[in-house]
């Protein structure tokens, strides 16, 4: 009986591992090397340590197995603390956070230069970049998996370039079929 329990337990652990999926987050400064090998669009999660909706989006949206798989298959994913102190190199420019205060690392801090450059003024903000690292669009606020899925699908193969009007976008939404339960 103990042996059966042991094998059942091992099988369950292996099964859970097969069905759980996590996003392969990389640092912003690593993207260039990845793009040389296999160009993909980029999803950039801009968060802060004190932001409640950011934590909920991490837990409820980015940990969704369908979202994680879709992002891993179609994008390079980057988490970036909008008030952190990482040095960012982007298009021959270097961005830092000269007002960063280490004593306030877990609370409100100075906004990073890169955050301001991207026009981010709310957290969380999801930024989409194309394969050449050009800004596609920022999407502000907390997104549930089905909401994020629409943007992921729209930007994965540059389908957004075909949308020239509100009616084009409405048609895209009307024909969109979610793959999330």
Image (cartoon, grey):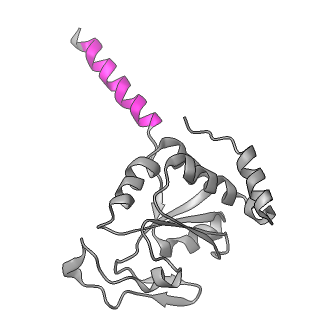
Image height of 138 relative to 59, above or below:
below
Question: Which stretch is magenta?
Answer: 3-19
Q: Give 36 or 121, whichever is nearer the viewer.
A: 121
- In the foreground, 163 or 22: 163
- Look at the picture and state if 19 lies above or below 9: below
Specify whether 53 is left or right of 166: left
Rendered location of residue 72, percent (x, y): 55, 52
When asked about the image quadrant of residue 156, the answer is bottom right
Residue 170 image position (x, y, % from top left): 74, 54
- Where 101 sits versus 1, above or below? below
> From the image, which quarter does the C terminus lie in?
top right
How many marks do you count on the picture? 0
Residue ID at (35%, 57%) = 55
Magenta-drawn stretch contains 49: no
- Horizontal placement of 24 versus 2: left or right? right
Residue 35's place in the image compared with 2, above or below, is: below
Q: Assign the N terminus to one quadrant of the image.
A: top left
Q: Residue at x 58, y 67 (%)?
A: 34
For the stretch drawn in magenta, what is the main secondary structure? Answer: helix
């Amino acid at each position: 009986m103990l042996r059966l329990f042991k094998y059942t337990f091992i099988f369950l652990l292996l099964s859970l591992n097969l069905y759980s999926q996590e996003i392969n987050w990389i640092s912003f400064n690593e993207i260039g090397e990845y793009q040389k090998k296999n160009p993909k669009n980029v999803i950039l999660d801009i968060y802060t340590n004190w932001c409640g909706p950011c934590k909920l989006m991490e837990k409820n949206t980015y940990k969704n197995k369908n979202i994680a798989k879709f992002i891993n298959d179609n994008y390079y994913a980057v988490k970036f603390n909008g008030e952190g102190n990482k040095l960012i190199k982007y298009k021959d420019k270097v961005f830092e956070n000269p007002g960063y205060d280490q004593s306030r690392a877990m609370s409100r801090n100075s906004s990073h230069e890169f955050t301001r450059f991207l026009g981010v003024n709310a957290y969380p903000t999801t930024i989409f970049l194309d394969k050449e690292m050009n800004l596609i669009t920022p999407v502000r606020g907390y997104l549930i998996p089905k909401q994020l899925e629409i943007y992921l699908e729209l930007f994965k193969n540059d389908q957004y370039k075909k949308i020239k009007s509100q009616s084009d976008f409405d048609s895209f939404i009307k024909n969109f079929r979610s793959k999330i339960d």
